[in-house]
Image (cartoon, grey):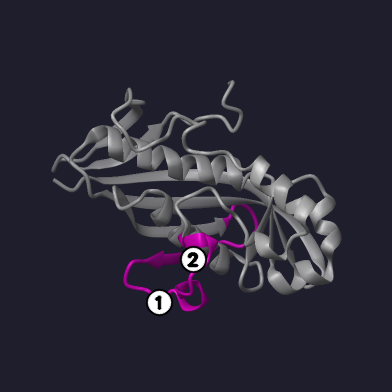
Amino acid sequence: MNVKIGSKYKIFANMFAEDELIATRFEVNVKFITNSENPYEYATAINRAAFFLTEMCENAIFVDDDSLEEYPELDNMGVDIIVLPNIACEQIIGVMLFCKLNAIMESKVFVDELSIKVDAGRKYEYFHNREDPLDEFDEMGWWHEKTLSIRHPENLSSEKRQTYFESLPTWANLQLEMGEDEITPPIDTKVDSDGDVLFVDFKKPSKDPEN
């Protein structure tokens, strides 16, 4: 049976657009639908999604290729740089997340719908579902890779490219491989009258595998 799962994430991150660095808090709501009957596989898949959102995106700078080329000093700020194919805004970040989460969950779970909004200020949110076009994200890119990649490394110097690869966690290091290892159980689960899971808060692995 396909199980429907909803989860909410709050992320503090930065958007660089129109020559300005804007620090803000995002609220991301994700509706998942499982595509595996193996509970370990879909628990692992959703834990991967949670890790990308709450660890890789937390404190990161979202920036488009052209702006990063114009302001290369962004790469020296000591935070992760998530490089987008278009100007950094809620809508573009939302479509990227829709693609990336689907990629890293390896078809064990799908994102049925994702919404994103700034936690304070503007009162509207952007939605993206499986019926909507991907536009520039239809092109092959890191957002379709199942690794924790967040940019294309070919434009980096050899030194920065090595640093980038060394800084990326692996699913093996995070104990989030798709295998028959011990399951990380979900907690705080709410179920509707039809037996579909409406909300589940999975344990979040740390970016530091030692913690």
Horizontal and vertical percent position of residue 14: 71, 54
* Residue toward you, 14 or 125: 14
Quadrant for residue 88, please give it: bottom right
Tag 1 residue? 133
One can see residue 125 in this view:
no
Image location (x, y in percent) of residue 1: 13, 45
Q: Is residue 107 above or below residue 40?
A: below
Q: Position of residue 94 (x, y in %)?
A: 51, 62
Question: As displayed, is residue 85 above or below residue 200?
Answer: below
Between 174 and 189, the residue placed more toward the observer is 174
Residue type beneath disc 2: Val
Quadrant position of residue 127 = bottom left
Write down the region rendered in magenta. Answer: 118-144
**Amino acid type indicated by mark 1:** Pro
Q: Is residue 100 left or right of residue 42?
A: right
Residue that carries the numbered disc 2 in the rendered image: 95
Q: Residue drawn 36% across and 36% down?
A: 44
* 111 to the left or right of 27: left
Circles 2 and 1, Cβ within 8 Å, touching? The answer is no
Q: Residue at x 67, y 50 (%)?
A: 13
| Image position of 185 (left or right of 165) | left
Which badge, 2 or 1, comes first in the chain's sequence? Answer: 2
